[in-house]
Amino acid sequence: MMNKGKHETGFWENLVLCTLALGIVGSFIVMPLFVLLKEAFAGGVRLWAESISNHDALSAIGLTLGVTAVVVPLNTAFGVAAAWALAKFRFRGRSLLLSLVDLPFAVSPVVAGLIFILVFGRHGWLGTWLTDHHTRIVFAVPGILLATLFVTFPFVARELIPLMTEQGSEEEQAALSLGASGWQTFVKVTLPNIKWGLLYGIILCNARAMGEFGAVSVVSGHIRGETNTLPLHVEVLYNEYSFTASFACASILAGLAIVTLILKTFVELKSERDTAR
Amino acid sequence: MKLRLKEKSVLPGFGLSLGFTVFYLSLLVLVPLSALVLRSSQLGPSGFIATIRNPRVLASFEVTFLSAFKAALINVVLGVTVAWFLVRGRFPLKRLADALVDLPFALPTAVSGIALTALLSPNSTLGAALGKLGIQVAFTTTGITIAMIFIGMPFVIRSVQPALADLSKELEEASRSLGASRFQTLWRVVFPLLAPSILSGFTLAFSRALGEYGSVVFIAGNMPMKTEIASLLIITKLEQFDYAGATAIAVALLSLSLISILLINVFQARSARYLGSA
């Protein structure tokens, strides 16, 4: 980012500004996080460890990790392909496609879950066919995968498209004219140029995939030990008034969120340094 | 004249990447979304209106819309303050504060929901203190608004922050040297230049709050007609196997959110033209 020189903010002005802003960040962001951790450890470390290591919690953690392991690579592949087509080429319908890629962000999570029920649910388009073939999509793991794919769909693409558009394709053209194959050009020229943007997109996609609640909640059916992801498990425990256990599981997700923020800041610093060079 | 579908390029992989993009997009996004549109068209205009005009549905829209609007307005004030601090303030741990601002994005919504409820419920320290002052937050529309402020704040901050950083210092100096007071400079020079990004942050926060579910349901109390949000009503209808009702509410909610995003794009295109010609 360009530094346009110091703005002369006086001492008192800076003090007022810092107090207000830190007050806002402190009360709206830090305080909920603090209360969450306090509640998670309210019963001591042993109870916390027990809450996150019982059978239901472990299976929820497993499902969340499994879903993420499928969703992130798929959406990353899509993001790279979409960015290649949309950033490196000009064609008719490009701007329409650009806005369609962003569409899932405009759809609220509950509605995102609903659309898969309308297609795959018992009264949905494919409902009778699926029942005849004894296949379940919604209220089962495939539904959770689809809903998570949908809500995390644009993350990688929307990081890469502006980045690759800005970079243009001169370097790729040079590589090709020097005899590199298409794949070599992509791996040796494009990929190093977009690595930080790609990583940034993957981090955001990963965080959302692990934490998605609304969409997954609609399609999961909340079967304990089977279709409960970690965020859903948090809800189930909370609604059963097992508050300490619920906050303990929530604290794992909060930990993941903090790791996400650290990685994100690291990638931002790295890419700033790269562009400054 | 021959219509050119694509400009010539020496780069390979156009067919493959575009084909995959369109295929994946259709399979995952367009086909399922068209199910929503087709379902609601089966309902017919009269059926659609009948569902929407149900008092409980109307009440949920009112609660959702008003809370989202209030939250987005408050977020403009809070968000601009924080963005101002992040760009122009001097503070040793500014980078930490900058990273923390994204926490509402990174934290799963259900986790935010239970954390806010624990913070503000009547049995908590803060909730009890506010209760003594006669302010009940949890299980009221105030609680809904606060959850929506939490979830929407990063949108305003991240929209305003780059615009503020790009603001050229010369404009403000010129304004000051021509005799404008500090306040006049802010109000007549800085604010108009920030207005498009503020508006964009407002709309993003508003549209996110309209559809928000996880962070709101725990603190809302979910009393029909009073503190029930539209997203929750969709789920309730689904649980009663009232697919038509759920679809109608979803379509109304989605349209509202798409219209607000469309409006902002139109407005931004106009203001870009205005700023470009100025």
Image (cartoon, rainbow, N blue to C red):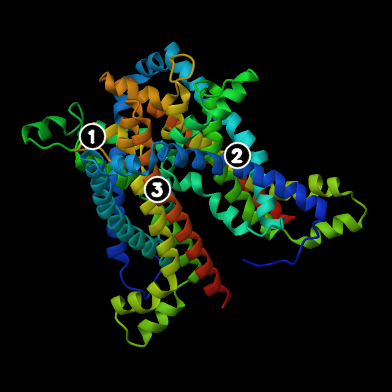
Residue B126 visible in this rendered orientation of the protein = yes
Marks counted in the figure total: 3
Query: What chain does badge 3 belong to?
Result: A
Mark-to-mark CA distance, 2 and 3? 37 Å
Residue that appears at 22% across and 43% down: A59
Residue that appears at 36% across and 82% down: A176
The mark lying in front, picked from 3 and 1, is 1
Disc marking residue A100: 3
Quadrant of residue A81 in the image? bottom left
Question: Disc 2 on helix, strand or loop?
Answer: helix
Which class describes the residues within 10 Å of circle 2: few (<14), some (14-19), or many (20+)? few
Q: Amino acid at mark 3?
A: Leu
Quadrant of residue A158 in the image? bottom left
In this figure, which residue is indicated by the disc labeled 2? A27
Instruction: Tell me where residue A8 appears, x and y as whole percent.
Output: 81, 60
Instruction: Tell me where residue A160 appears, x and y as whole percent.
Output: 43, 62
Nearest the viewer among B172 and B112 is B112
**Figure check: B175 above or below A222:** below
Mark-to-mark CA distance, 1 and 2? 43 Å
**Figure check: B247 above or below B178:** above
Q: Amino acid at mark 1?
A: Val
Query: What chain does badge 2 belong to?
Result: A
Residue B265 visible in this rendered orientation of the protein = no
- Describe residue B8's horizontal placement relative to residue B198 as left or right: left
Residue that appears at 92% across and 56% down: B178
- Describe residue B67's horizontal placement relative to residue B85 as left or right: left
